[in-house]
Amino acid sequence: METPYGWITIAIFAGLIVTFLQRSVEDSEPRDSILSYLPPSIGCAVSNYLGNEGYPIFAILGIAAVLAYIYLVIKPFKRHGG
C-alpha cells in the first residue's frame, strides 16, 4: 500500500466485509447475496490499481462509483423491508 488509494480502498472493502458478515448472521429476510458484493470489491481493486499507476482522476471516479453502488444497492444504513 504505497498510495492513499490503497488505504481508502482497503477501508471500503473492510466495511463491505463487516456489512456482509453482520447481515449473514441476521435472521431477517431478505438475505443479501454474496454476488451483490462482487462489483464494489472489483471496483476497489481497479481503483487502487489506477491510483497506483498514476491515474488519480480515474481512481477517484472509481472510488466514487463504488461508494454510490454501496449506498444504492447494498444500502448499509437502511435495512431492506423495514
Image (cartoon, helix red, strand yellow):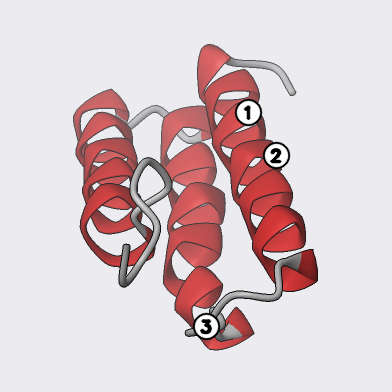
Residue 63 is left or right of residue 4, and the answer is left
Residue 82 is left or right of residue 45, and the answer is left
Residue type pointed to by label 3? Glu
Q: Position of residue 49 (x, y in %)?
A: 53, 45
Label 1 Cα neighbours within 10 Å, binned few <14 / some 14-19 / many ≥20: few
- The circle on residue 29 is 3
Give me the residue at 52% from left, 65% from top: 42
- The circle on residue 30 is none
Label 3 Cα neighbours within 10 Å, binned few <14 / some 14-19 / many ≥20: few
- The circle on residue 11 is 1
Tag 3's secondary structure? Answer: loop
Tag 2's secondary structure? Answer: helix
Give me the residue at 54% from left, 23% from top: 8
In this picture, is 20 found above or below 8? below
Q: Quadrant of the C terminus?
A: bottom left
Question: According to the image, label 2 marks what residue?
Answer: 14
Give me the residue at 29% from left, 45% from top: 62
In this picture, is 11 found above or below 30? above
The reply to whether callout 1 and callout 2 are in contact (CB within 8 Å) is yes
